Image (tube, grey):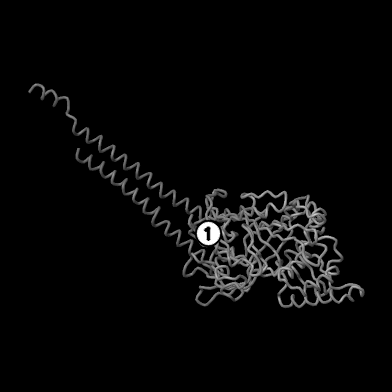
Amino acid sequence: MCTKIVIAGSVSGLGVILVALGAGLGWGLFPSIIEDEVIKNIVLTNTSMSYENWQKLPQPMEFQVHIMEVENPEEVHSTGAKPKMREKGPYVYLEYKEKENIQFSEDGNIVEYEQRTFFEYSPELSGPTLSEDDEVSVLNAALMGVLLTPDIEDDGVQLTGLAAGFNFLFDNPESVFTKVKVRDLLFDGILIKCQGSEAITANIFWKFVCIEMKRQFDNGLLPPAIRYDDESKNFFYSFFYHKSNKTDGHFKVLTGKTDVKKVGEIVEWEYEPTLKFWSGDECNAIKGSDATIFSPFMDKETKIYVFATDLCRSIYLSYDKEISHEGISGYRYVVDALQLGNLSSRPENYCFCPPNGACLKEGAMDLFPCFNGPVILSMPHFYQAPDYEIMVENLTPSKEKHQIYLDIETLSGAPLGAGRRVQFNMMIKKIRNFDITKNLPVAVVPLIWVNEGLTLNEENTNLLKDELISKLIIVDGVRWGLIGVGCAVFVAGAALFFVWRGSFKKPSKKQTKRRRST
């Protein structure tokens, strides 16, 4: 009988060992092995698995452009009516990003590069009802921007010369609103005329304005949206020509060799460790990556910093909720309202305020120091910018449609999906010496909003599953399998122990009769 009890105890002991083994392997050794594998793959080297996807995005992003038309331009121009907005789009372009001139430091801690962006219009994703040849009725941002710039800078001399010559620049405009083809608005350009007939050329003020614009262009002082055409000697204004087939500066970033949590972190941009656009150190700090690589091992407390060259600033995303993409679990991180908060809600944003004007209200940011032009940034449809939403009509701000978000598989830092949603706006108001503006209301008018979107496609989702998720599933299977078997074995051993122990103590029928006769 003692032998049976020993056997039962051994069975239970084996169960305890299996449970301990499952816990030790499942929460100790295996995760450590997988983490080491992640680190080896994520650190940027010529041969690491992350290098190829970092050097060239494995799939194009969808660059979705929503054009904000003005339904009542004549009323706004002549009577100061509130602009009624109408969204048209999205016009979808495939956006390709590829790094070039890549150079690693000798110690492998730093990599330098430039990143080129290409755009390709997609009729399929845009849909059959949309075309780049569509005409849209919009605020003439080229004209309004040219008028606002000297007004903001309080440059009386430039305003006087411009007042005498700007009609020639824009071919005698009757309104600050215009009809324009989508392809011209976005890439090809709206004409700013500096060449014409002899009668026009005789206008000394027009010539003065064009000469001054050329001087500013040569010195990098014009907005990037304005380009000079050497052949025609004219200027053209478009939203994205300056981004197409162009690089967005010289980057120097960490490879993650000494600290994988800092992989992709920008050390310098354009050969400088900080920016020079803003009036304070905090606003000029360059934080985070270029959004083509993210650090692994994220949690709900992680803040993801990203540097946006076209906004001349860093932004951060914080945890919002758990998500799932095709069976892969992850976290969603979002940009909160404080990123564009005014001084009352976020005092440290003081350095984003223009030095020669008042700070904007909640939910908007003045990009003049970045663009060399009067462009105002907000979320689409003035989401989280209620003071500006009421300046126009027909907007429907929505967190689901208009908030910036990033979906991440937190162990590897692999992006599962993203939506970088921003809106560009411009103020309209009366400007002295320009009758074309005399009846305009004071309002911030949306021009376009853009969603740089990405949803990990089937091919790359399966690749992520094969490289990482399948291993995690195996680890989970081994861990819980050993724990489950161990628990079952332990329970079986315990059951045998109690059964055999009870049998050992229970007297036989003959023993019971002897006790009674005694």
The residue at the far top in this view is 517
Q: Nearer the viewer, residue 54 or 264?
A: 264
Q: How many marks?
A: 1
- In the rendered image, residue 77, in percent from the top left (x then y), is placed at 81, 57
- Above-or-below relation of 376 to 21: below
Quadrant in which the N terminus is drawn:
top left
* Horizontal arrangement in the rendering, residue 225 relative to residue 341 (left or right): right
**Which sits in the foreground, 139 or 94?**
139
The x, y position of residue 374, in whole percent, is: 71, 65
Residue 111: x and y in percent read 56, 72
Q: Secondary structure at mark 1?
A: loop
Q: Which residue is mark 1?
A: 413
Q: Horizontally, is 298 left or right of 126 in the view? A: left
Amino acid on which disc 1 is placed = Gly
Q: Quadrant of residue 189?
A: bottom right
Q: Nearer the viewer, residue 341 or 86?
A: 341
Residue found 22% across the figure and 40% down from its top: 5
The residue sitting at 64% across, 49% down in the picture is 398
